[in-house]
Amino acid sequence: MRKIRLSPLVSAIVLTGCSSAAFAQLGTNLSVDVRSLALGNAVTADPPGISAVHFNPAALTKIEGLQTDMQGIIANFDIQREFTVPAGYNVFGYSDDPMVCNDGPEVTADICTDFKDKVSGDVEYASLYVPVLKKMVDFGAGQPIAAPTMGIAYNPPGSKATFASAVYAPLIAGFGAENGNPGNFMGQQVALERITYLSPTVGYQVSDELSIGGGVGMSYQAIGLKSDLRFPNELIGMLRMIDEVVCTPFKENSDIITDILLLGMCNTEEGMNPFGKFGQMELALEQSLSPSYNLGVLWEPREDFSFGMVYQSAAKMRMKGRYRIHNAKAPQEMIKGLMSSPTGQILAAILGFPNAVPNSESGLVSMDFEYPQHVQAGIKYKVMPDLQINFDVGWTDYRAWDKFRFEFDRQISALKIAKLLSENVTDNSLALPLKFTSPWNWGIGIEYSATDRLKLRAGYEPRSTSIPDGKRNTMVPINGAQLFGMGIGYRFDADTDLDLSIGFLRSKDNIPANASSLANLTGVNNLIFNPYAGLNVKTDTKITILGLNYRTRW
């Protein structure tokens, strides 16, 4: 059956789209600058050194002479995923799901007699996609992801222009788990990264009170995924019933008559099971050059007050990559059974099914991906000579992720069938409706000058979710988040500063059974996107970030 053959491919690509969406919102501005992290990213009116390239290019005019920044940021991902069974749980009358059922092989009933209280599918280690190797690399258990960055800026003597460029990571995140982890059905390994490797930028001082700036960012974008696949669906449950009930009398006594009447579906060594593993998918998409631009303005009418605004453009990409599918035995046997019957062959020919399903297959895939535009504005106000408050509001155009459209390097028969049922499918493409929203967010930061050398900082940034309730999933669990930051700044001398910051982001989610069409929705028409159909899902994500910045003027 061609549709069953395609299911691993479609499912994995869809999950990849969801992962990029969730990661992008969860990880925005977490790995760019140490001082900004401590101030809840409320720095548009008070950008930090060369990182103004990202936060507000106009503030580069605050730099004199030659300056270099070197930063090291490490992040630890603690993602807990919990699955529980609600009352009345079953898929087409079956509830013996080994993921949530304690019954052993000695229990032959289709209904589970002893459900587990809860099942944990926690993330076990960090992962990162390495461009040169063209694959994902796992860190050891408990090992964090590191993101070193650096920048250089120069203000010629007597010039109103300041030139700068920085290497930084607007987004870098990834995680993985060992074989057999229950969370692997929505990503055993996931990696998403955007690395800006060149960002020529200029800030210009128009007057004593007003500065403007702009720059171009040249970035590398990558998405990587490895995922186990299963489809606890009513349709698959019906196929199991046919195999175990209808076909049982004919397993050892089939003849031409039964083959014709039953389409050869009983001539299989392994039947379909809604709780069985259907295969595994590996996928990687990348774009080596993804340009974007930043524009900023900084207005400082008084010493104790300033206003800043920045516009970060969208980055539109044509990402390309490869996929590899490892098919399980059950779908292969299903097609083999159809091909053993004259009527099964006729049905397969009418529907355009393949003659066989291989053990593995690979090919090319591409997609148009847009890193969304962002606008942020804020103020800096000194309520006391030693106490400063920053406040920012921002908006990111996640509405651009209304749908993701994936294009394959060949026509696929299953899509020819599916296009009759959905306007989002053509012969060689599949569109995933996400219906993201574009919420506003805010952040606040406080900086206290304890001495002429020592500054103490704290910040808070609540992050509203852009993912609708009906699209939440466990790939990167998020339903709103809170970012807390703290840090210190110490000036060794007139030309040397050191910043140390720590940030903590927390996001908890509860997805009741049948609440999300990308996680746990049951029904005949939800074959592909619901590996935890009918189960309650809870997630708890904690990200801890530690950063150190060494800034020197020459």
Image (cartoon, helix red, strand yellow):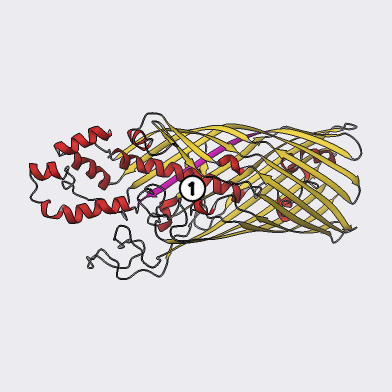
- Whether residue 133 is visible here, answered yes or no, is no
> Given the image, on which type of amino acid does mark 1 rest?
Val
- 364 or 336, which lies in front? 336
- 137 or 357, which lies in front? 357
Q: Quadrant of residue 553?
A: top right
Quarter of the image with the N terminus is top left
Q: Quadrant of residue 443?
A: bottom right
Q: Main secondary structure of the magenta part?
A: strand
Quarter of the image with the C terminus is top right
- Residue at image x 18%, y 56%? 245
| Pointer 1 local density, CA inside 10 Å: few below 14, some 14–19, many at least 20 | many
Mark 1, residue position: 190
Which percent across, then down, holds residue 256?
8, 41
Which percent across, then down, holds residue 334?
23, 44
Which percent across, then down, holds residue 326?
33, 43
Q: Secondary structure at mark 1?
A: strand
The residues colored magenta run 217-231
